[in-house]
Image (tube, grey):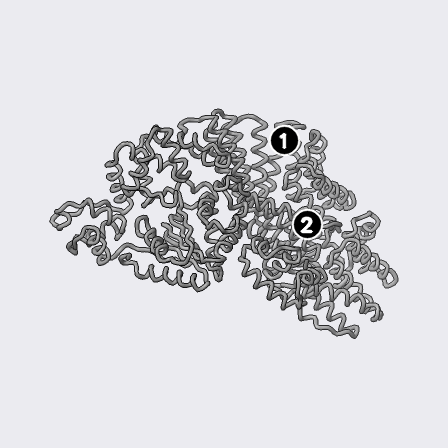
Amino acid sequence: MLLGRGPECARIDRLLAALRQGAGGALVLSGEAGIGKTALLDYARDHSGGLRVPAVSGAEAETSFPLAALERLLTVMPAHAAPAPRALRGSAEREIPDPEDRFAVGAEFLRTLTAAACSTPLLVLVDDAQWLDRPTLDAVVFVARRLRTERIGILVATREPRGPAGLETSVVRGLDDVAAGQLLAAVLGRRLPDDVVSAAAAQVGGNPSALVELAGTLSADELAGTRPLRLPVRAGTAATGIFGTRIAALDGATRHALQVAAVAADDGLPVVSAVLTDLGIDRRALAALEDAGLASFGGGRLSFPHPLIRSAAVCDLSPTRRRALHRAVADRLTDPARQDRRAWHLTEATLAPDEDTARELEQSARLTSERRGCAAVAVVMEQAAAFSADEPGTARRLCAAADAARRAGRSTTALRLLDRSEDHTTDPELRAVGASIRGRVELHTGAACVARRLWETSAADLGPARGAHLLALAAEGALVCGEPEGALRLARRAIRAAPPRDTDTALLGTFVIGSALSMSGNTSDGVRWLQDAEALARSGADADVEWVLLAELGAVAWHGEDGDPRRVLEPLVHRLRAEGAWGQLPLALYVTALTDSRLGRLHSGRRAATEAVELAARTGELLVLCAALGCLAELEAQLGDEQACRTHAAQSLRIRERIGPGEMHRDALDALGLLELSLNRPDRALSLLQEANRRPFGGADDLLLTRASSADLIEAYVRTGREIPDAVREQLRLLPDLGLPDALGALVCRARALIGDDAECNAWFTRALHLHARSPSPFDTARTALCFGERLRRAGRRRDAREHLEAAFVAFRHIGARTWAAQAATELGAVGRPVDGSAPAAGHRLTPQELQVARLAAHGGTNREIAEELFLSVKTIEMHLGRLYRKLGVRSRTQLANYLHDNVLA
């Protein structure tokens, strides 16, 4: 029986009862070391009859190794449970797991636990959670927040003062005087005076572990109260002192065995035993440790009754002896799958710079990249730099660490590492590598002009051929700053100077030239260059993922994209998630959202844009954040969500004010102009769309028809009755003869139809619809049909108008564009075909999560696969499928797929 723990035990009993009744739940026990959290976990285990109880404890030495604790937990899962996905398999199977993705890992961990709990409820015990590596803790918390009906319970003990947000936390406090007296009496076999108990409890804060250890060290005078207690001030200090005394009483072999166990406990009992053999220590010393109560070996695993035993075991080791033990352990870790543990021990074993150790760490970084993502690579490479034997090696490895940190979205860390790298080298080429990384950090955190100057200066230091890529980067910086002429000059120089097979420079330079030409009004040439960039990105060449994403952005944003970019984007998004490349994922999600907007996948696009915004805000990627907020606002303008559109567009424009002149804010202006058109406020739309389509650094009337929103600008002029400037009319007159891609050509034809007389508008609208059919874009097609129907109605051709207005209404309803559907409904009423424009189609009554489940099911995903993708349990997926089947009136996945396809939701 636990003393003084009635409330905590009662709460654990409720959790156990709920598990036996088929409900899940989680509880966090928070308190200082030795306060009794482990005893409460033991209480739960002792009262868990009928449950399976896998357990894991955090290890201080593993906190910097992502997923290490989760891998250990999986080795004690029930043998009949479904095999863990690759991302959760580790040393137990000697298989290299997938790279870190905290969301995917959480979902896979939930699936593994759910499979294990199918036949028998599962109670997962997690001790010393303050020492869990972060990804393991994230996975545990991820699952704990989602437990409802999965017959899974999670009980977590931690020293952190507050448990994770969203989880019930019970703070385990010190024993009161009554409970402390009972505990001391049980240990000593006699009752102590109240003042002695109160003094002891006060000195150790009621810490039961310290009280138990203290009981055997008190003198008769102290026990009788005739002499003041000589106690340490804090429980941690007391425990360390007491364990130190017990350790000192061991014979030499047993004490050495404890020291080896303390150093290598996280590597497993076989490694500890092997090291003992190597050092000539009889393995029977381990049994002596267990007899002394300083270690236990239940289930073939090494553990310590108190975490401070490990610290006490090595506190009196000389530095030389400690390094020797780490070296001995490293020598035993020869399995390539444990390269990261070997490298860690080598760092602890090495006193001075050592190139062999640095190389080991560099190899570990490659393994870490495959297993645990960019952030972990940055940590390991920084360690490798610290052990480098020469300045160039130090600088090179710090650069590599900085690049990994940049890709992980840790800009401040990347800049710090680059500063250190520059202190170790004067080599122009290595400094240029650092400049390339630094500039990309500056660019994405909103300092595009700073990045441009840095790249241009560094390129000049290297000369034409070696500085070609830096010139291409400088061209990108000029483009983002809104300087198309400077961008053109730099990009052309870069392409001319680039050596053969320099794919990155060719791709980036080509994209910049195409974008700059388009921004300058040379639309036809710009589109051709952008198409070349897209072709180069898809040619299979090994190009930087960022340049591939820019090529896809150009394809979608500037010329409409005649194919489906999702075939390229979806694998890229998956890859970046798998690599933990949180610094690059927002750009990929932004391009995905923009693509979905063009393809009429408005709800899917809104989800992608929302995630892009959240990630970019978290990582400080201001450039992408500005653009993603604008894209999100544009999707909301299409969907008819006025308040959200205005909020996100305003946020995008505020960021533009912070980062200075540039182009990324134009998405927000496009969105607001589109919103005002949907609300029949053309005067407001006109001023916004004029700003969105103004030449960079141009005057108030210096407009360029180069963007998709240029068609909206013409529509705003027409609806306000304002005179269209002659220069704009001339541009519009020339555009149809420039051989533009179908998607862009259709918008140009719609604009020509809007300004044409009755005799020619029919031909232009018909041509626009023909081009739309060749490059499907449901929203744009419906907009053209709506404009055509309105024009025909005003011309008195009601029957002809009805056909196009009905097509527009159906299309808007199908993709969820509520406000636009209402416009089409109003026009249909005017031609004698009233419809209900307020009620959304059934598919758009689905919740966002139901829509995700529907799409994945329609694409052939099993319930288990869908659960993994959405980080939910299989039972939750089954519930969602049942609801959406009823909402849509379908009975099979085939019917579901047909419904989504027919309603442009697939």
- Disc 1 crowd rating (10 Å Cα; few below 14, some 14-19, many 20+) is many
Residue 597 numbered mark, or none: none
Q: Residue at point 64% right, 44% down? A: 480
- Kindly state the secondary structure of the residue where label 1 is placed: helix
In the picture, measured across the screen, residue 697 lies left or right of residue 371, that is: right
User: Which quadrant is home to the N terminus?
Assistant: bottom left
Which type of secondary structure does the marked residue at label 2 adopt? Answer: helix
- Marks 2 and 1 in Cβ contact (< 8 Å): no
User: Which residue is labeled 2 in the image?
Assistant: 566
Q: 709 or 403, which lies in front?
A: 403
Question: In the image, residue 171 lies at what x, y percent?
Answer: 34, 56
Q: Residue at coordinates 37% horizontally, 54% vertically from top-left?
A: 45
72 or 165: which is nearer to us? Answer: 72
- From the image, tell me which residue sits under label 1: 459
Q: Quadrant of the C terminus?
A: bottom right
- Percent x, y for residue 567? 69, 48
Q: Quadrant of residue 542?
A: top right
